[in-house]
Image (spheres, rainbow, N blue to C red):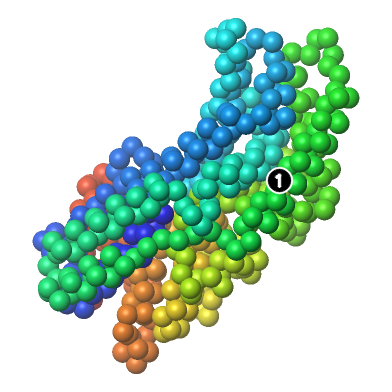
Amino acid sequence: MKRTVVLLLLSFLCVYSTRLAHKFSSTVHPCDDFEEFVCNEDENGGLSPLFDSLRNGFYDRLKEALLKDNDVVIEGLKNLFAGPNITFQVDFPYHSHVPTRYLNLTYHNGLTNNTHRIDTTQIQVYLNLLFSKYTHQNKLRNANWTNEVYNLYDDVKAQVIGIVQNSTLEQEHINKFVSSFKQQGVDGGLENEESYFYVLMSALSTIQQRFIDLKNTLTLEADCNDDCKIKRYSNLVETAMNETVYSDRTLERLPFVLSIPQELRDILNRMFIRTKSPTMSVQLVPVAFFYVPWTEDSIEYMMKYNELIYQFSLEAFTDVVSDDDRFLQMAKGDGFKCYHRAGYCRAHIEFLEAVRLTTKIIKERTEDGGSGFSDLHWFFFYMQSRWCIHGMTEEEYACDSTFKPFLKQSTDFQKAFNCKPGHKLYTAAENMCKIFV
């Protein structure tokens, strides 16, 4: 959300400030109040306060829903032990700079303070399907979004307006920006969302019934300890998933999950989905997908999200976001070309943002596996594409020829926003603030 909102609104200001011959510098940079969004020096793992608020609100709702649900699989697992409390530790890979985000759910039985932590690797897919159900039930991806999402957006909009009003721009431009920002809004949801939900519920019901049938045949040896019980129980869940979901590929029709085609499964299991289960083929689509800009021009992309993401080739695209040089080469091609047509360009970039965020979810997360292609690079790519929209004709400005110099300036951009020395993205480059020419 932080990326899409800030990039969408901030680009207007930055582009027109440039045309008035302003440069971002230590003395003149009308966007200086965006330091908190750019530097991200707090203890939030590099996320802005806005984005963190959206993310935390999402996880809190999922946690509450899971704790209240009487799901047969979860209830059975709770009742498997006579004494210890049980803690699920579910891994929510979300952001390349935050390798893991654990959701710890502890069930208290009141008998003891001892806690048994459960390895959820084998039931991760099932948990993700549950969370997809809760997502719908809690209106986290419904067209009628929750009030707090609107309030957070309005919060940012108010900040943007305040920044513009206090900027060094000429009054006529200030008035124009303020008027434009006030008209900005958010909308969301997918067509036929209800039918998708019924498909999901049907799949869950099938899995649960198969699980119950298997559980009735479960026998445990007399010497089977807690770890043994967990392993045997988790195997039942995995078997129920494999025998139902993967047999008819029902879930591939769901926008709630990112289905992985057979030809890419081995590659992704090896490179991106760090799992012991070779059959895992669905992952929960990230929160960011729920908050993509929704305009008339982007509908043709968003409605075919699961289909189009593979036209980019998931494997190749992940290589791209990990390799600056390769991206810069692809940026010159038709796939990333700015076509000087406002609607198409805007929709194209919005879709690209959604693809980028989803790709970052499933890419391999090791200490040396993080993407060197920073969010600031994407900011410049986005902003340069927006430049093509605002009054620049092909004769006046050749979009393709300017991608590279903009994408190279993440360090200068950090300095222009007064990111403090020592920040992880700050380096001592000598040529400060040469962002715009």
Which residue is more in the foreground, 77 or 332?
A: 77
x and y percentages locating residue 79 in the rendered image: 70, 18
On the image, the x and y values in percent for residue 60 come to: 48, 36
x and y percentages locating residue 293 in the rendered image: 44, 63
The answer, for residue 260, to whether it is visible in the render is: no
* Count of marks, rendered view: 1
Q: Is residue 2 left or right of residue 116?
A: left
Q: Is residue 255 left or right of residue 203?
A: left
Q: Residue at x 57, y 61 (%)?
A: 190
Location of residue 98 in the rendering, given as x and y in whole percent from the top left corner: 46, 42
233 or 280, which lies in front? 233
User: Who's the residue at 78% across and 54% down the image?
Assistant: 249
Q: Residues within 10 Å of mark 1 (few under 14, many from 20)?
A: some
Q: Amino acid at mark 1?
A: Met
The residue drawn where x is 76% and y is 26% is 233
Pick the front one: 104 or 278: 104
Find disc 1 in the rendering and name its residue: 201
In the current view of this chain or complex, which residue is farthest to the top?
111
- On-image quarter of the N terminus: bottom left
**Residue at the bottom extreme of this rendering:** 395
Residue at the location (71% across, 35% down)?
A: 122
What secondary structure is marked by label 1? helix
Q: Quadrant of residue 399?
A: bottom left
Image quarter hosting the C terminus: bottom left
Q: Is residue 64 visible?
A: yes
Please give left or right for residue 319 compared with residue 425 in the image: right
Residue 74 position (above or below residue 417): above
